[in-house]
């Protein structure tokens, strides 16, 4: 029946070196993230998995608070169009000058929010609908993590493989 969104994402995080396991089923199962933080634009799954504008607005303060705590964010990957739109809104509220015309959501889109803000990358959401229809493949998600990693390497330096 295919993988759920969390399985699809966890496997990609492990392939990219950000997670120690390819799957997480419950709190305390040993799944550990390193060098990456995951959050959501809404804090609960609403009916039909479609959060209302008011629900997203009500949760914005939590995202602002998390970003205040994360001092060295260099790349943000917005997973899905809702996350992409809300992330741009949040960074505009934080002083980012959004490019004009407003950037369009698309898989692997890269948006420069200015020197004081992280780079924004977009990815299709790993919902069953997107993964089972092939709109999002593991290779496509790996591509987004690869773009992120390329943008984390300081200019004129290369990443040496681990010993």
Image (cartoon, helix red, strand yellow):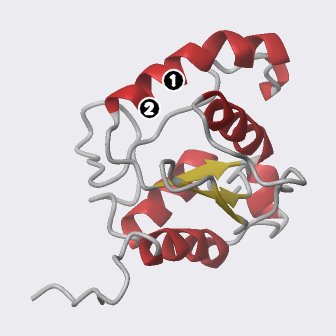
Q: What label does residue 64 carry, if any?
A: 1
| Residue nearer the viewer, 162 or 137 | 162
| Residue nearer the viewer, 38 or 100 | 100
Residue 52 is at least partly visible in this image: no
Residue drawn at (79%, 46%) of the image:
81
| Residue nearer the viewer, 71 or 126 | 71
The x, y position of residue 29, in whole percent, is 27, 39
Q: What label does residue 67 carry, if any?
A: 2
Query: Residue 46 falls in which quadrant of the image?
Result: top right
In the picture provided, is 9 more to the left or to the right than 83? left
Q: Is residue 111 above or below residue 39?
A: below
For label 1, the SS is helix
Measured Cα–Cα span from mark 2 to mark 1? 5 Å
Query: Residue 123 falls in which quadrant of the image?
Result: bottom right
Q: Is residue 97 above or below residue 153?
A: above
Residue drawn at (54%, 75%) of the image:
147
The x, y position of residue 155, in whole percent, is 37, 82
For label 2, the SS is helix
Residue 147 is at least partly visible in this image: yes
- In this view, the residue farthest toward the right is 101
Discs 2, 1 touching: Cβ within 8 Å: yes
- Work out which quarter of the rendered image holds the C terminus and state it: bottom left
Query: Residue 122 falls in which quadrant of the image?
Result: bottom right
The x, y position of residue 111, in whole percent, is 68, 60
Residue drawn at (16%, 85%) of the image:
162
In the picture provided, is 146 more to the left or to the right than 120? left
């Amino acid at each position: 029946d295919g993988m759920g969104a969390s399985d699809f994402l966890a496997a990609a995080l492990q392939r990219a070196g950000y997670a120690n396991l390819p799957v997480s089923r419950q709190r305390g199962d040993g799944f550990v993230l390193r060098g990456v933080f995951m959050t959501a634009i809404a804090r609960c799954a609403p009916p039909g998995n479609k959060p209302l504008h008011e629900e997203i607005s009500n949760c914005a303060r939590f995202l602002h608070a998390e970003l205040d705590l994360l001092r060295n964010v260099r790349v943000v990957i917005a997973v899905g169009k809702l996350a992409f739109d809300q992330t741009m809104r949040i960074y505009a509220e934080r002083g980012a000058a959004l490019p004009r015309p407003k950037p369009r959501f698309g898989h692997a889109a890269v948006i420069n929010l200015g020197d004081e803000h992280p780079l924004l990358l977009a990815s299709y959401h790993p919902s069953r609908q997107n993964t089972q229809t092939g709109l999002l493949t593991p290779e496509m998600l790996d591509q987004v993590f690869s773009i992120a990693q390329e943008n984390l390497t300081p200019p004129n330096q290369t990443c040496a493989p681990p010993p």
